[in-house]
């Protein structure tokens, strides 16, 4: 339990930009600790996206429950959430006070750039696992679903919830 708590506390402490930006560090951590394979992690990402709640919390809960049951889920979830809670209590007080200081604004822009890079890394990871699976199984339908999703969201502003449900149903029938 302590190992799970420590692993996710570290993730929560050193990751910025939300759940998607945290995924590369979570992946690196589960690999370092030998908790799951890359394929299992890509499933974790998909489940974390489609279940209610924060992606990082869902991912931590999923890893924890697979590694050590309910106590593991609680340990990992507390570990990933506690740093944000502590940091926000401290930072909220001084950011509001110093938000017009040039160095603080510069730091915020720098952190935004890192967040973009981390989210892009998560996208590349998930795309690689999906595309690799699609090509290994000669299942180009998965690529069509991915392209159709991008098109539907960009062109028609479709709800990600309905697209996710439709893609899950389509995937279940296609891969069945």
Image (cartoon, grey):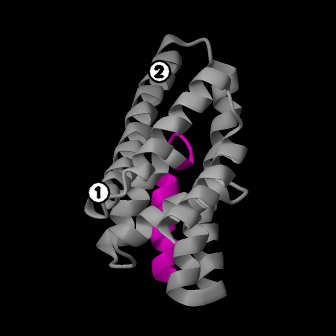
Secondary element type, mark 1: helix
Q: CA distance from mark 1 to mark 2?
A: 35 Å
Residue 93 x, y percent position in the rendering:
70, 33
State the residue position of label 1: 132
Task: Give the residue drawn at x 57%, y 65%.
Answer: 173
Residue neighbourhood size for the residue with mark 2, other residues' Cα within 10 Å, grouped as few (<14), some (14–19), many (≥20)? few
Left or right: residue 18 versus residue 147 is right
Residue 85 visible in this rendered orientation of the protein: no
Task: Give the residue drawn at x 46%, y 24%.
Answer: 107
**Which quarter of the picture shows residue 37?**
bottom left
> Where residue 47 is drawn, which disc sits there?
none
The mark that comes first in sequence, 1 or 2, is: 2
Decide which of 37, 138 is in the foreground and name it.
Answer: 138
Residue 164 visible in this rendered orientation of the protein: yes
Residue 27 x, y percent position in the rendering:
38, 62
Decide which of 146, 11 is in the foreground and name it.
Answer: 146
Residue 75 x, y percent position in the rendering:
60, 77
Give the magenta-colored segment's residue range.
Answer: 1-19
Q: Nearer the viewer, mark 1 or mark 2?
A: 1
Secondary element type, mark 2: helix
Task: Give the residue drawn at x 50%, y 11%.
Answer: 102
């Amino acid at each position: 339990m302590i190992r799970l708590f420590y692993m996710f506390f570290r993730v929560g402490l050193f990751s910025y930009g939300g759940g998607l930006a945290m995924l590369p560090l979570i992946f690196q951590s589960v690999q370092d600790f030998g908790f799951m394979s890359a394929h299992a992690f890509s499933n974790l990402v998909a489940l974390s996206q489609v279940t209610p709640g924060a992606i990082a919390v869902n991912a931590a809960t999923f890893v924890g429950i697979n590694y050590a049951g309910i106590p593991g889920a609680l340990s990992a979830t507390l570990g990933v959430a506690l740093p944000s809670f502590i940091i926000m209590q401290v930072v909220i007080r001084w950011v509001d006070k110093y938000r017009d200081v040039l160095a603080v604004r510069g730091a915020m822009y720098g952190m935004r750039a890192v967040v973009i890079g981390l989210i892009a890394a998560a996208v590349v990871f998930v795309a690689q696992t999906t595309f690799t699976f699609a090509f290994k199984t000669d299942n180009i339908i998965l690529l069509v679903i991915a392209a159709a999703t991008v098109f539907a969201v960009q062109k028609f502003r479709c709800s990600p919830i309905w697209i996710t449900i439709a893609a899950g149903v389509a995937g279940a029938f296609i891969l069945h």
